[in-house]
């Protein structure tokens, strides 16, 4: 089976989207789904960096290692390479919408809309807050990831 190609996108590509990638990888394995995953940021601030240590730590607590990831910026090519591009918040979504070439096949959506009862479709940016924001992000992302995978498994 050819893998479903999924790109998670946030602003810096160091907090939310690397965490979403790691969680989707684990949840897809649990469901026996074949996903090819990557993550990227709409901004260039953190290119080449490891995920934020607080994201690394909160995922380590549930047995997920994201230390292989390095930040990169999203490109126009991504809209031809990936089947799904999953934006973490509305600002990311708007940026991606502007960048998306008109005939490109990728489905661009707000990731949080797969579980919008949690927080109106957005994954809150935990960067400027404390550790509890990263724990909340992890819970939120796990819930959305399960819903998203249910969706692609049934379509
Ligand atoms: P992320 O969080 O978009 O979830 O990776 C942020 C990371 C860095 C910055 C903002 C948000 N920053 O302003 O540097």
Image: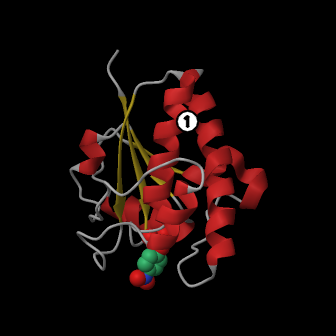
Q: Is residue 30 above or below residue 129?
A: above
Asked whether residue 122 is in view, the answer is yes
> At 46% across and 39% down in the image, what residue appears?
25
Exactly how many numbered labels are in the figure?
1
Question: Camera-side residue: 123 or 24?
Answer: 24
> At 23% across and 55% down in the image, what residue appears?
76
Quarter of the image with the N terminus is: top left
Q: Where residue 127 appears, x then y in whole percent? A: 53, 78
Displayed quadrant of residue 89:
bottom right
Quarter of the image with the C terminus is: top right
Displayed quadrant of residue 6:
top left
Asked whether residue 155 is in view, the answer is no
Q: Is residue 141 above or below residue 137?
A: above
> At 30% across and 76% down in the image, what residue appears?
46
Q: Is residue 117 above or below residue 152?
A: below
Q: Is residue 129 above or below residue 34?
A: below
Q: Where residue 78 appears, x then y in whole percent? A: 27, 49
Q: In the shown orientation, is residue 111 left or right of residue 52?
A: right
Question: Camera-side residue: 18 or 155?
Answer: 18
Q: In the shown orientation, is residue 50 left or right of residue 129?
A: left
Task: Name the residue furthest top.
Answer: 1
> At 31% across and 54% down in the image, what residue appears?
68
Task: Name the residue furthest right.
Answer: 117
Q: Where residue 124 appears, x then y in whole percent? A: 62, 69
Task: Name the residue furthest bottom.
Answer: 128
Q: In the shown orientation, is residue 93 left or right of residue 124?
A: left
Read off the residue under disc 1: 27
Displayed quadrant of residue 146:
top right
Write down which quadrant ligand 1 falls in: bottom left
10 Å crowding of disc 1: few (<14), some (14-19), many (20+)? some
> Callout 1: helix, strand or loop?
helix
Q: Where residue 91 appears, x then y in whole percent? A: 50, 71
């Amino acid at each position: 089976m050819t893998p479903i190609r999924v790109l998670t996108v946030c602003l810096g590509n160091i907090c939310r989207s690397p965490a979403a990638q790691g969680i989707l990888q684990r949840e897809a394995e649990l469901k026996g789904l074949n996903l090819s995953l990557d993550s990227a940021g709409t901004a260039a601030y953190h290119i080449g960096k490891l995920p934020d240590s607080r994201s690394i730590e909160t995922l380590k607590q549930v047995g997920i290692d994201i230390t292989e990831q390095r930040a990169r910026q999203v490109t126009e090519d991504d809209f031809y390479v990936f089947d799904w591009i999953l934006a973490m918040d509305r600002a990311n979504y708007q940026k991606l919408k502007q960048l998306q070439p008109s005939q490109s096949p990728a489905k661009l959506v707000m990731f949080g809309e797969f579980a919008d009862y949690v927080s109106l479709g957005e994954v809150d940016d935990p960067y400027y807050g404390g550790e509890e924001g990263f724990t909340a992000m992890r819970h939120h992302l796990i819930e959305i990831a399960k819903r998203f995978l249910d969706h692609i498994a049934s379509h």
